[in-house]
Image (spheres, helix red, strand yellow):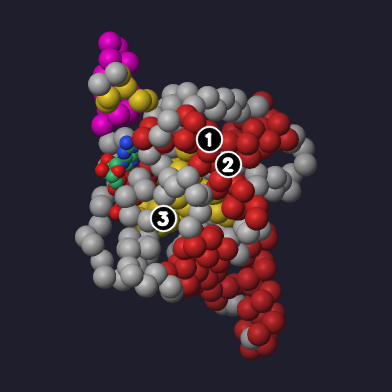
């Protein structure tokens, strides 16, 4: 694979610096069939063993874990990882998308309830989900029915970024063909995934960077739970008879590009679009159906 390493342009760097002086909080939902590499990716992203394989569940569940990460520049990232064990694992998977949507909406409801309180709770925790990494099974046919239905439903309530895990198990040619089938399916079904062009703050020109990121979709990542040392170099990777696949090598995977989207260049866009577009839309829908809540809201504000 030869995806270029996305250089964070100076403007994006400056912006990140502004956001991160005080540290930042991000909530990520990981969704996708069992065995697509979600937990391994999360461990790789957090550089720790936070994600364990859950007990096999008879139902889909949603669980939320929190972790604080110290970045090399001293920034603290408070990360919440929402996982959906059991997703897509049953004979009848209908209702799985709704369970996740209900979880997303209940986080919006909590914020809306809090807004209607005359006296705010200083300890209130905002658990709105800013981005969903949707892990696809690497099939040459692209998306399956469950993927299409789930992405369609989730994308109304969260920014969705499609990801193909285990990129090292495919040849460059296979990967390119999977990527193009996935994007063709996304376009033909009009699935409103995150398009990297949400930017309220027009001071920054990220057009080229955004074009390059869109070209890369779906991100093809390699995750690894093992850290190897070769000479003086330590890296997360996977060992093969011919050598190593390094997760951070842009020739081997889009991991670094995705990581810099989440923790750098697009963190503010993901949060802004969650609050200003997705939550606002939900809030308007909800209030238009609930005049009593609307009345309480006008008293509280
Ligand atoms: N070759 C390769 N194998 C991987 C990669 N990521 C994960 N695996 C392997 O694939 C298997 C499943 O990975 P998990 O990370 O547990 O997958 P998951 O999506 O969390 O699965 P569930 O928790 O059951 O939903 C494990 O044996 C991993 O070691 C990868 O990038 N490359
Ligand atoms: Mg897992």
Farthest residue in the right direction?
202
Is residue 7 toward the left or the right of residue 259 in the image? right
| Residue 182 drawn in magenta | no
Residue at screen point 42% across, 49% down: 137
Ligand 1 closer than 8 Å to label 3 CB: yes
Most prominent secondary structure in the magenta stretch? strand
Residue at image coords 67%, 37%: 210
x, y (%) of residue 191? Answer: 62, 58
Residue that label 1 marks: 176
Residue bearing mark 3: 32
| Residue 102 shows in this picture | yes
Q: Which residue corresponds to the image point at 30% horizontal and 19% vertical from the top-left? A: 243
Residue closest to the far front: 141
Image: magenta residue range: 226-238
| Residue 158 quadrant | bottom right
The x, y position of residue 177, in whole percent, is: 53, 38
SS at mark 3 in the image: strand
Mark yes or no: residue 128 visible. no
Magenta-colored stretch includes residue 229: yes
Which mark lies nearer to you, 3 or 1? 1
Disc 2: CA contacts within 10 A as few (<14), some (14-19) or many (>=20): some
| Residue for badge 2 | 180
Q: Is residue 113 left or right of residue 211?
A: left
Check if mark 3's residue and mark 1's residue have beta carbons within 8 Å: no
Marks 3 and 1, how far apart at CA: 20 Å
Q: Secondary structure at mark 2?
A: helix
């Amino acid at each position: 694979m030869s995806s270029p390493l996305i250089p964070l342009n100076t403007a994006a760097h400056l912006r990140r610096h502004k956001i991160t002086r005080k540290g930042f909080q991000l909530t990520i939902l990981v969704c996708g069939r069992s065995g697509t590499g979600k937990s391994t990716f999360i461990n790789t992203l957090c550089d720790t063993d936070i994600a364990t394989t859950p007990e096999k569940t008879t139902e889909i569940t949603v669980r939320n874990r929190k972790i604080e990460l110290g970045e090399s520049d001293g920034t603290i990232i408070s990360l919440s990882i929402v996982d959906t064990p059991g997703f897509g694992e049953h004979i009848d998977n209908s209702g799985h998308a709704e369970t996740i949507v209900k979880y997303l909406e209940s986080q919006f409801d909590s914020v809306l309830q809090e807004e209607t309180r005359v006296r705010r709770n200083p300890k209130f925790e905002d658990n709105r989900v800013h981005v969903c990494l949707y892990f696809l099974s690497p099939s040459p046919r692209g998306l399956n029915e469950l993927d299409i239905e789930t992405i369609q439903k989730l994308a109304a309530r969260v920014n969705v970024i499609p990801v193909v895990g285990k990129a090292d198990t495919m040849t460059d040619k296979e990967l390119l063909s999977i990527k193009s089938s996935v994007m063709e399916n996304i376009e033909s079904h009009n699935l409103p995934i995150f398009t990297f062009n949400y930017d309220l703050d027009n001071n920054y020109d990220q057009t080229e960077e955004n074009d390059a990121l869109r070209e890369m979709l779906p991100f093809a990542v390699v995750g690894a739970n093992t850290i190897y040392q070769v000479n003086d170099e330590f890296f997360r990777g996977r060992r093969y008879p011919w050598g190593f696949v390094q997760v951070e090598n842009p020739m081997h995977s889009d991991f670094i590009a995705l990581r810099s989207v989440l923790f750098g260049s697009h963190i503010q866009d993901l949060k802004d679009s969650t609050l200003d577009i997705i939550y606002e839309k939900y809030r308007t829908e909800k209030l238009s159906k609930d005049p009593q809540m609307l009345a309480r809201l006008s008293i509280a504000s």
